[in-house]
Image (cartoon, helix red, strand yellow):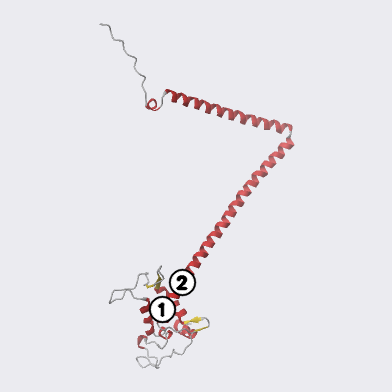
C-alpha cells in the first residue's frame, strides 16, 4: 500500500493571527511606512527652514533682527492679551458673584417682609395697636422680638417654631400651636400686653392699678408712647 504523504501543516496563528488577516497586516505595514515617511519629510522640511533662516540672517541681518523683534513683540502682546482676558474674566466673575449675593440678600429681605406682613395681619386681628412714633410701630417692636419664632411656609402660612426650628406643639392637645393663639398669648405679657388695645398686661401677677401682687408700686406703662415702651422693654 503506498505510503500517505504528510499534509503540510497550516501555519500557526497566535492572538494576532486570530485577529488580523494577511491583508490587514499588509495594510498596517503600509500605514506604518507612510507614517515614517511623513515624519522624515517633516524633519527634512524643518531642517530646510532652519537653514533658510540662517542664510537669511547672514544675507539680511538687519531685516532678520527686525523680524525677530516683531516676533518677540507679538509674543508679548499675546501674553498681555491672555493676562487682560484673565483679568476681565476675574472682574466679571466677581461682579456675577456680587450680583448673586445681592439677589440672595434681596430675596431674604423680601421673605422677611412677607413674614412680617403675615404677622402684622394676625397682630391687628388680635387687637394690636396701630399707632406709631418716630418711625416705630408696635408691630415693629413685637416682630423684632418674636419674629424668629415663626417660619413662613411656601403657601404663605406661618408656623410657630422652637429654637431648633421644629413646630411648637400644645402640651394638652398635641397639636401645633396656631400663630393666632401664640400672638394672642402676649396680651397677658407685662410689656407686650400694652401693645394691644384695651389690654394692660398682667404677666407675673403685675396689676397696672399701681401695685403688683405683693403691694409694691410699679410703673404704669399704659400711657407711654411706642418709642418710650421700646426703651422700657429693651433697656434702651
Q: How many marks?
A: 2
Image point (65%, 46%), residue name: 76
Distance CA(mark 2)–CA(mark 1): 16 Å
Name the spot of residue 212 as percent of width and height, x first.
37, 91
Q: Name the residue under label 2.
A: 112
Instruction: Using the rendered view, name the quadrant where residue 67 is placed.
Output: top right
Does residue 138 lie above or below 26 as drawn?
below
Q: Which mark is residue 122?
A: 1
Instruction: Using the rendered view, name the quadrant where residue 195 is placed.
Output: bottom left
Image point (51%, 25%), residue name: 33
Name the spot of residue 49 as percent of width and height, x first.
65, 31
In the image as oriented, which residue stretches furthest toward the top?
A: 1
Please, what secondary structure does the residue beneath circle 1 have? helix
Instruction: Using the rendered view, name the quadrant where residue 126 is placed.
Output: bottom left
Viewer-closest of 103 and 121: 121
Name the spot of residue 150 as percent of width and height, x first.
40, 73
Amino acid at each position: 500500500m503506498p505510503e500517505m504523504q504528510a499534509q503540510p501543516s497550516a501555519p500557526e496563528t497566535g492572538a494576532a493571527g486570530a485577529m488580523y488577516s494577511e491583508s490587514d497586516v499588509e495594510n498596517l505595514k503600509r500605514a506604518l511606512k507612510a507614517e515614517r515617511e511623513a515624519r522624515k519629510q517633516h524633519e527634512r522640511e524643518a531642517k530646510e527652514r532652519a537653514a533658510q533662516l540662517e542664510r537669511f540672517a547672514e544675507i539680511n541681518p538687519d531685516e532678520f533682527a527686525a523680524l525677530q523683534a516683531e516676533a518677540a513683540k507679538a509674543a508679548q502682546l499675546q501674553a498681555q492679551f491672555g493676562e487682560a482676558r484673565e483679568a476681565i474674566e476675574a472682574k466679571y466673575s466677581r461682579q456675577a458673584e456680587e450680583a448673586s449675593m445681592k439677589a440672595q440678600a434681596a430675596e431674604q429681605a423680601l421673605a422677611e417682609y412677607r413674614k412680617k406682613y403675615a404677622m402684622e395681619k394676625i397682630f391687628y386681628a388680635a387687637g394690636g395697636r396701630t399707632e406709631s412714633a418716630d418711625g416705630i410701630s408696635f408691630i415693629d417692636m413685637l416682630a423684632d422680638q418674636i419674629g424668629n419664632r415663626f417660619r413662613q411656609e411656601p403657601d404663605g402660612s406661618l408656623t410657630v417654631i422652637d429654637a431648633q426650628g421644629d413646630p411648637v406643639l400644645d402640651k394638652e392637645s398635641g397639636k401645633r400651636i396656631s400663630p393666632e393663639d401664640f400672638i394672642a398669648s402676649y396680651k397677658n405679657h407685662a410689656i407686650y400686653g400694652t401693645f394691644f388695645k384695651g389690654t394692660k398686661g398682667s404677666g407675673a401677677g403685675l396689676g397696672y392699678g399701681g401695685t403688683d401682687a405683693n403691694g409694691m408700686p410699679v410703673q404704669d406703662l399704659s400711657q407711654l408712647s411706642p418709642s418710650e415702651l421700646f426703651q422700657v422693654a429693651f433697656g434702651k
